[in-house]
Image (tube, helix red, strand yellow):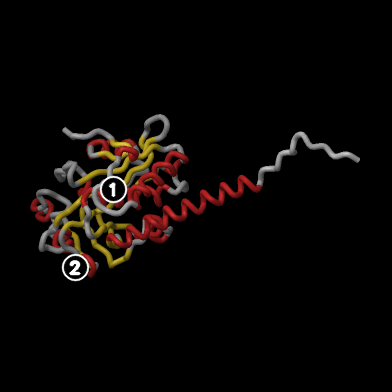
Amino acid sequence: MYPHGPCALSDVRTTHGPRILGQYFAFADAAARDRGVDLRIRWDFDRLLEVSQQNSDNFPAVSPIFNPTYSVLTPDAAFWIEGVDASGTTVVTSAARLCDHGERSLADDLRSLRIFFDRPEPRLAAGERVDVVAPAAEHIRGKVMASGIVWVRPDYRRHGFTRIVPRLARSYALTCWNPSLFWGLIKPEHDEIGLTQAYGSWQMGGRLIIQMPSWVGYVEPFFLWMDREALLKDIAASCGQATTESSRRMETAKTSTSPRARQGISKRS
């Protein structure tokens, strides 16, 4: 059982972080509504699996990191963002999970598959493996956030959701957990079309070599990471850009409106 149902962004209360986080929640909420989508926070990862199955022709395979079949995902350490259209159908997702690596490095937990499975031993015995060719991952320790499951239904793409929703997931994670760092993976072909830049101010720190038939088979995604300061600068820039664009629209509306004729005054020849 999950202790909470979906939570509207308007009900979010910030715990950690500066005021800009609340400003970004308001910006993301308004921007999504302008595009016909309501955003909310969910903790039911079984529902996320349902969404992936209902959209299997265009939804990427759900990483074991976010798959309740392989890991216990508790509300205090994992959530996902859901965007629904006017009919209540899910059209946007993005997920986050808090991982505490302690004195181990993120690279250690990737190689051991501990980050993917609660019981990695059978997977290792079956020959599944992850090789880490990402120097940055060797130095990441403690509490950090894993980012993933960014999906937008094809008819809602090219409307800016890949810029809005992943940032929202990291912002909410920051106010809940205050992690020092965020990381994620992206396929080279997605990086080539500009999704890395769309997702945020990521640093690219090498790649992983994943051999995992139970998930994606063989892939070599790039390893991405971002610290807390970079995230705050990123969302501040997003809020600032939104304010500037709003001001420009208001000015354009004013200047494009013809002045009304002044009543009660007539010209005499």
The reply to whether discs 1 and 2 touch (Cβ–Cβ < 8 Å) is no
Please name the amino acid that badge 1 sits on.
Answer: Tyr
The percent coordinates of residue 112 (x first, y second) are 12, 59
Disc 2 target residue: 139
Viewport quadrant of the C terminus: top right
* SS class, disc 2: helix
Give the residue drawn at x 31%, y 43%.
81
Which residue is more in the foreground, 162 or 265? Answer: 265
Residue 262's mark? none
Give the residue drawn at x 28%, y 67%.
206
Label 1 to label 2, Cα distance in Å?
A: 24 Å
Which residue is more in the foreground, 200 or 118? Answer: 200
Q: Residues within 10 Å of mark 2 (few under 14, many from 20)?
A: few
Viewport quadrant of the N terminus: top left
Residue 43 against residue 123 in the figure, above or below: above
Residue 172's mark? 1
Residue 132 against residue 266 in the figure, above or below: below
Viewer-nearest of labels 1 and 2?
A: 1
Q: How many marks?
A: 2
* SS class, disc 1: helix
Q: Is residue 88 left or right of residue 158?
A: left
The percent coordinates of residue 8 (x first, y second) are 32, 37
Q: Quadrant of residue 227?
A: bottom left
Please name the amino acid that badge 2 sits on.
Answer: His
The percent coordinates of residue 186 (x first, y second) are 32, 57
Which residue is more in the foreground, 56 or 8? Answer: 8
Give the residue drawn at x 65%, y 48%.
255
